[in-house]
Amino acid sequence: MNIPESSYPRVVIIGGGFAGINFARKIANKHIQVVLIDKRNYHTFQPLLYQVSSAGLEPDSIAYPLRKILKNHKNTFFRLAEVESINSEKNELMTSIGNISYDYLVIATGTKTNYFGNKSIETYGMPMKKVPQALNIRSLILQNFEQAAITHDKEARKALLNFVIVGGGPTGVELAGAIAELKNHILPRDYRDLIPEDMQIYLLEGSPRVLPTMSEHASKKASKFLSKLGVLVHCDTFVKNYDGKRVTTNSNLELQSETLIWAAGVTGNPVEGLQADVLVDRANRYKVNEYNQVEGYDNIFALGDISLMQTDDYPNGHPQVAQPAIQQGELLGKNLVKLISGKPMKKFKYRDKGSMATVGRNKAVVDLKRFRFAGFFAWFVWMFVHLMALVGFRNRVIVFFNWGYNYINFDKAARLIIRPFNKLN
């Protein structure tokens, strides 16, 4: 890997997500050698992936080079590689570009899409966890519009213009609202040979309400906003099968659709090599103590979505969202310096800053500890929080400009088929 020898202890980080980069920033410029390994050379701001999928933003607006994050930090290195396994006895990590030894290992590999064993959905459905997947969805949506404009078969046109989103959490709700805005504002202007009413957006949720992890107030408001936008919401509805053309569910609902977007769940993305009993089977997450140490290991830590820290307040672990990952990364950065210095570490306690979701223009819901609100002010708060959370000043400026332009012109300027998507590949 061409990492220089050092008298400082070496900390290897797997993953450049929220947990990984916040941890790296905290221990940078200390008497520690830091090596960050990721299979992509950029950090992805996942909360805005749906806007790339729906042509609202270009991918470089929500991605930031990992080397740029680390460039001003001494004794800090980045390597582009795929991690293969861990040898905890030798304190060694095996990767696609060679092996590297470590004194401390931090696993921040996040999650991957969970299809719950449904192979047909895995084969024909569209996941949205990565930038390339978001671009695939964008291309497919626009290709469907183009194909619908030239087909003479009414049933084929209906299938092309039916969009099925599975999962009524924040991702599914936000994506449904964004695609509805394509229908309401873009389709009538760009595709005058299509009838907007022929396009339907279905949101399918297995629980009794959308946004099941948020308050009843947020759920009711979000359902109302989606209905106004023309989204057809079906709760208590599970997808049983999808063959690329037809969606079958646990109810009488059966849909003809060329596009099924899967936003119904995630599972941990562990690395091979650690003892099997440190993984919680159902969640695929590492069991950690209140210092984020993996159970049974003194020098191996897990952060964010891949970690499961059971406490009285969170017996099933913390929610797999950005804030726990950021807070765990920052605290472990401080704790590791203390550990190396022989000082006692501080236990992690999650500070819940609330949750929010946007449903479209002037429409959002916000749950705070003491307040719940919805509508324009919630939408403004949502925009401000996400804008400030973006990595890099340039990204904030670009996103702010795009949002302002889109708001004034009722437009989504990134509707480009740069890389055509073929469902058969």
Image (cartoon, rainbow, N blue to C red):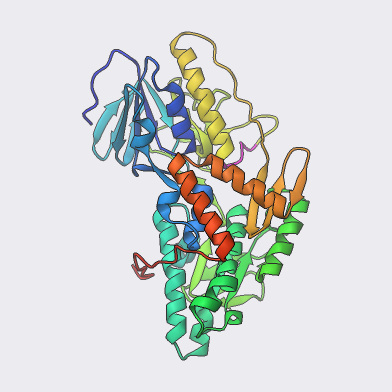
Tell which of 166 and 309 is nearer to you.
166
Q: Residue 58 appears at what percent x and percent y?
A: 43, 56
Total tally of numbered discs in the picture: 0
Q: Is residue 176 left or right of residue 303?
A: right
Tell which of 148 and 208 is nearer to you.
148
The C terminus - image quarter = bottom left
Q: Name above or below for residue 153 compared with residue 268.
A: below
Residue at image point 34% right, 42% down: 41
Q: Is residue 117 left or right of residue 94?
A: right
Q: Residue 146 appears at what percent x and percent y?
A: 43, 78
In magenta segment, residue 320: yes
Q: Which stretch did the figure color magenta?
A: 316-321
Q: Name above or below for residue 258 compared with residue 105.
A: below
Q: Is residue 312 left or right of residue 391?
A: right
Q: Is residue 242 left or right of residue 374?
A: left
Residue at image point 51% right, 57% down: 51
Q: Name above or below for residue 225 compared with residue 273.
A: below
Dominant secondary-structure state across the stretch colored magenta: loop
Q: Residue 323 appears at what percent x and percent y?
A: 58, 37
Q: Residue 9 appears at what percent x and percent y?
A: 35, 16
In magenta segment, residue 268: no
Tell which of 166 and 193 is nearer to you.
193
- Residue 238 quadrant: bottom right
Q: Residue furthest left?
A: 2
